[in-house]
Image (tube, grey):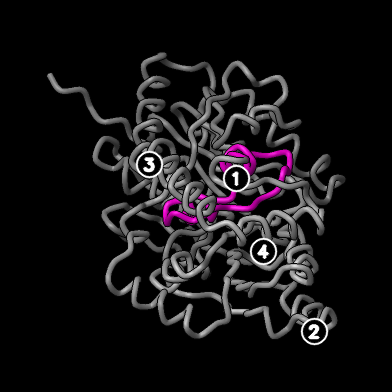
Amino acid sequence: MTARRPRVVHVGKFYPPVSGGMERVLQLLCERERAEVDTRVLVANTQRVTVHETVQGVPVTRVANIGSAGSVALCPSLSLWLSRAEADVTVIHEPNPMALMAYALARPPGKLIVWFHSEVVRDRWKYALLYRPWFAHAMRRASRVVVASPPMCDVEQLRGFDTKTVVIPYGVDQTPLKPSPEVVERAARLRDRHQGPLILSVGRMVPYKGLDILLRSMVDVRATAVLVGNGPERPALEDLARALGIESRVVFVGPVEDIELTAWYYACDVFVLPSITRAEAFGVVQIEAMACGKPVVSTSVPSGVPWVNCHGETGLVVPPGDVRGLAAALGSLLGDASTRQRMGECGRQRVRDEFTADRMAARAVELYREVVSEGTVEEPAVAAMSLR
């Protein structure tokens, strides 16, 4: 007799077409695990109505959103949808105060997995008063805690839960990252349009990304920095580029479609992730660049970032906030084509071995089956949500 597929509920902050880095990880996870798991998704809607739809074969419920408190979408009916989930396994994608509160109210049956994406590093008093009690409540009841890299096992918030913490690295879909004829043509046009060599950075323009450090390092690097993305820091960064006298060698591209981003990966000579705090927990853009055969320069922030980019193998790792160190690393790679090629190939192989969407999903499915096989729990479990 064939065993019933585990019923798994994921809840994310948003889900494509509204998405960011972690939302894209959630999307890939749900799409790839769906062949083995009865997967459903609960996410915040952008409107005051609840909508049910299917996205790439995945059933998605977008829960009515009445507003926001900072970056947290307020979805009062989330607890109702959790109570109706009837899941064998429910997964909270953390940090996510709304989901934690909804879980405490709904107490849905089944097993709980907390997928811990990053620490809460801002507003410590708010964390202590409004967030930590809900987080502790869920963590006590979780069957497993998932992190994306071994260094994340040691973060302060997870102390005391090491016996149930497991590592499932993020994965990327390699298909759209392949050098199709259209991608190759676009990449060639981009290189012709901008003075090389090209240094690429991708991400939201927020303080912890360290883009000001990158711009300051560019004073001593004879290259053009291409910044893909947008955010509240963009005006200040544009002002800084002018003040440093490097505005002719800094290109602010803004948000781009996937095929254009892939073309930028192939057009660049070096990819850089200059983040300065552990708010950068992994850096999915690193593995996208590595999948395209590009060497990476990143920083030794106390998170998974330097674990992804192996110093001396797939790229170079420098101290966070070190302008001279960053400039030296970039200059070293730009001046050595053979090293760039060797590191790029090592990076591409590391992605194949460790960071594919299929591997991520297979590890997740194995974990679901493992926790389901452990039998019933004394207290109900939670569903998954990612509010960043």
Is residue 284 inside the magenta stretch?
yes
In the rendered view of the protein, which quadrant contains the C terminus? bottom right
- Badge 3 marks a residue whose secondary structure is helix
Amino acid, disc 4: Ser
Give coordinates of residue 201: x percent, y percent.
61, 65
To which residue does mark 1 refer? 282
- Badge 4 marks a residue whose secondary structure is strand
Give coordinates of residue 369: x percent, y percent.
35, 23
Going from N to C along the chain, the mark reached first, 3 or 4, is: 4
Marks counted in the figure total: 4
Give coordinates of residue 350: x percent, y percent.
45, 40
Q: Which marked residue is nearer to the observer: mark 3 or mark 4? A: 3
- Quadrant of residue 66 in the image? bottom right
Residues drawn in magenta: 283-311
Give coordinates of residue 5: x percent, y percent.
26, 31
In the rendered structure, the answer to whether residue 264 lies left or right of residue 116 reads left
Task: Measure the alpha-carbon separation of dots 1 and 3.
Answer: 17 Å
- Badge 2 marks a residue whose secondary structure is helix
Residue extending farthest left: 1
To which residue does mark 3 refer? 352
Tell me what residue is drawn at x 33 percent, y 63 percent.
Answer: 179
Answer yes or no: is residue 314 visible. Answer: yes
In the rendered view of the protein, which quadrant contains the N terminus? top left
Going from N to C along the chain, the mark reached first, 4 or 2, is: 4
Q: Compared to 112, does 240 lie above or below?
A: below
Q: Compared to 179, does 29 lie above or below?
A: above
Q: Compared to 226, does 118 lie above or below?
A: above
Tell me, yes or no, whether the two marked residues, 4 and 2, touch with CB atoms within 8 Å. Answer: no
